[in-house]
Image (cartoon, rainbow, N blue to C red):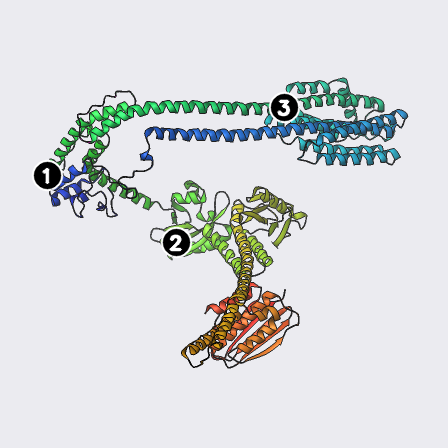
Amino acid sequence: MQRSGSGRPNSRRGTPQGRPGSPADVALGPGAPLARVALAARFAGAARLRAWLRTRFRRDRPPPHPRLGPDRPPFLSRLRVGSKLMLLVLLPVTGLLAFTAFSAVAQWEEARMLGRFHTATEVSFATTAVSDAVAGERIAAVEARLRPAPGTVAGRSVAERATGRALTRAAGRAVSWPEADVAGRLDAVSRRLHAVRVQTGTGSLTARAIAQEYQGIEDELLDTVGTLESGRPTRASGQAADAHIAILGAIEAAEREQAEIAVLLDAPSGRRPTATGRWPALEEAQLGEFRQKTSDQLRAELYITQFQAPGRAVRKVRDLLAAPDPKATAWPSYSLWLADSKDRIDALRGIQDRAAHELAGTAANDLSSARVRSVRDLAVSLAVLAVVTVLALALRRSITRPLGEVSAGARALSSGDLSYDIRYAGRDELGDVADTFRELRVTTEKLAAEIRSMNTAIDDNRLEHRADVLSFDGTWAQLLGGMNGTMASFAAAHGRRRKAERELEGIFNLSPDLLCITGVDGYFKRVNPAFERTLGYSGEELLAKPSIEFVHREDRHTTRVALDRLAGGVELAEFENRYLREDGTECWLQWSARPVPEEGLVYAAARDVTESRRTAREQSALRRVATRVAHGEPPDSVFGAVADEVGDLLSVGGAAVLRYEPDGALTVLGAARVPAPGAGSGSAESEAAAREVARTRTAARVGRSVGAPIVVDGRLWGVVVASSLLEPLPGGTESRLADFTELIATAVANADSRAQLTASRARVVAAGDASRRRIERDLHDGVQQRLVALQLDLRLAESMITDRSCELAQQIAHVGKGLDDAFQDLLQVARGIHPAILSKGGLGPALRSLARRSAVPVELDLRLPTERLPEQLEVAAYYVTSECLTNAAKHAHASVVEVAAEIRDDFLELTIRDDGVGGAELGRGSGLIGLVDRVEAIGGKLDVASPPGEGTTMTVRLPLA
């Protein structure tokens, strides 16, 4: 039953008697107050209440839906149970099909990514072969330069041919990889190799220079390999790729070390440097990375390689280089070093080949697994779909057959035939329904007896009567239990009210403000927990020290003066000072205190106003900058003001507003106190903070600098940076700066909005002018021509009448005059919409035409150039003049109007004066407002001076560009 806001039943719906004020307006649902039942019985009578109870529990059919009507149930109610079951099955089946489709697409995409990675590894291996060939050519070229001989020169030629073959094979492989210009990089490598070979052949390069030239080529090849193997679709492929790249880096470091030491050993013994190079450390770092990423087998092979004879020989040479005074006899020979280092590098290349095989095998296995998994998942999904469909059909048959029998029994029971017995005795829910129908008759009789007993108790006004709730279940038990619990609810409500009053009193006594009792000796006598929460000290610490020791040093003098006034019996109100918290930060407290001299005590209350003072400062800064924005100051002035306000607000050494450019550069828009990022070496931390903000899109701290992002329309527009010159900024500076940066975002948004508004107004004015020209052209080419044709036909008909005095001739003459008047009105309308003379002759002739048609005498002073002015400028000047002439005639009652126009400093200055009544205001009337919009839309300015009784002067400045 619906209830109104007053707690009474709504008589429009669910009212058995159908009239206001009847006992049907008393609710007897679960939890209804028993007092309402007593009132209903007292005022309406026990007989009428019993009649309502009988009506309340009568098994009436629910009213029809107001939209569907009595013979049109909802759509789902018109479906059979079998159809509903099939619809229910279709939902998971459809979801399964969708999941299968999405899974297939995802697995196909995974297989495609794995295929691309497999192709990339093949191209990478070909590029690795080129890198190996270039490394061999480098050592051959160094040997030929150091020890020129037929054998070394021939070895260099053989290495060059091997490099050429490797480049040819790699270029062929690179064609199959379209995502990166590997072929272009290989071509660039080939050209660089050719240049190095030419210089090597002419002998213009030293051995060290040759090694450095080949080193650059090797770096480019290794970068290409790293790019190709950066896909890493799976973890296993990524580890194998990392291991392969690491062993390549280690080999390259060993080869560079080989060339450098060969150059050292070729030098005379007295001039050999003893400082070691950086390549051993780089090689060890790469080998460490390789050990972490590779398999146990390759890790063991690497360990064996390092402790074989070549590896020990290389370590011995490294130790000699690292020694402060190595013996000359301990140095290996040039050829022995080359042999040992080549053997060691060859061993590392063998490990690299096996790492490449592992990478290729891992990529192939991942690709094969993805393909097998996609086929397997698809097959499993289709099998599950078939099983679900078969089970749905079987379930439909097992439910619809017994449900028909239960439905027949329900129809018999609804007609009042309680003797009907349902024969279905299954163990499912339908069997439970059949058992419920058989038990319903017994339950109905018991419920009727309880209702009769309740009616009797109501008639006798025995409100302590209780129904036997334990004999019923479900809704019937809830109904009877609600009536039984009504009287007990009164006592429970009284107890809850007393408890709520105590809780309210306790909450009232707990104040969030700082309350204390202090003595005239300067010690706190008692403090509330708010002191401990605000200052961070324990109660014992606050009571153990004089209160002045917790005050900020700069405020102790004023605090002592206030304490002296309290000791003299003067009350204190809204006194503010700073206290130091336990963590060293300061907070502002506002005090109100009342002394009790006879007790030697002071009762005081304080409120933490730190945030409110900070907010007030921020709001003042916001208002100052917002005022600049509202006054339309240039953006650089606004940004400089923002930087000044940030510096003052945060008390920092310097602040700056920067904008992120598309190429990643930073543009300083405004700075205060110190150089902005990019202005010198002292701005490194500020620039780093700006870069960190760009990376994280949140406020960041770098050293003594903090930065906060400026977000405009959801994009990262710029950053505000604040820096301290001597010590780090306090905690929380990032959040304060982030809150304040919303100002610059608003300022930028306002500037963008102003520019967009100006452009929009210009477009609206241009569209309106185009519409005026189109309408004027349509009137001229359409309606005007038809009127001329009608005039000619009418004149022809008039000429055919012989008797000019007849009534028909007079009527035709009257119609002809009306057509002439309509034609002249049409001409006036067309000229007002868009004058043709303005489009054909320009502004000067158009203004003269306006002066000739004006109802008020016009004095023209036009100093315009012979060439045409911009179209928008001419249209704006024309309509301003037209509106002023119209106002002078209709409202100002002027006797003469002066119109002057000239070009001055790339502006068209238009001045219109009249000697009318004056009193014109821009804010009154849509005509002047429309003129202002039109002028400002093209960047101009319109001023009106119209003192009452002294005429009106309108000055317009329109830019030519």
Q: Which mark is residue 592?
A: 2
Mark nearer the viewer, 1 or 3:
3
Looking at the image, is mark 3 or mark 2 earlier in the sequence? Answer: 3
* Residue sitting nearer the eye, 291 or 562: 291
Q: CA distance from mark 3 to mark 2?
A: 80 Å
Q: Position of residue 831 (x, y in %)?
A: 53, 71
Secondary structure, mark 3, is: helix
Is most of the magenta stretch helix, strand or loop? Answer: loop
Residue at screen point 40% across, 78% down: 807
Residue stretch rendered in magenta on the structure? 415-424
Residue at screen point 60% across, 57% down: 636
Q: Position of residue 793 (x, y in %)?
A: 50, 72
Q: Which residue, as the protein is rendered here, is positioned at the far front?
A: 802
Secondary structure, mark 2, is: strand
Q: Dividing the picture into quarters, in which one does residue 293 lie?
A: top right
User: Which quarter of the rendered picture does the C terminus lie within?
Assistant: bottom right
**Tag 3 residue:** 364
Mark nearer the viewer, 1 or 2:
1
Is residue 406 toward the left or the right of residue 241 in the image?
left
Q: Position of residue 530 (x, y in %)?
A: 40, 44
* Residue sitting nearer the eye, 626 or 324: 626
Q: Which mark is residue 459?
A: 1
Residue 768's place in the image compared with 719, above or below, is below
* Amino acid identity at mark 1: Asp
Residue 951's place in the image compared with 37, above or below, is below
User: Which quarter of the rendered picture does the N terminus lie within?
Assistant: top left
Residue at screen point 51% across, 29% down: 103
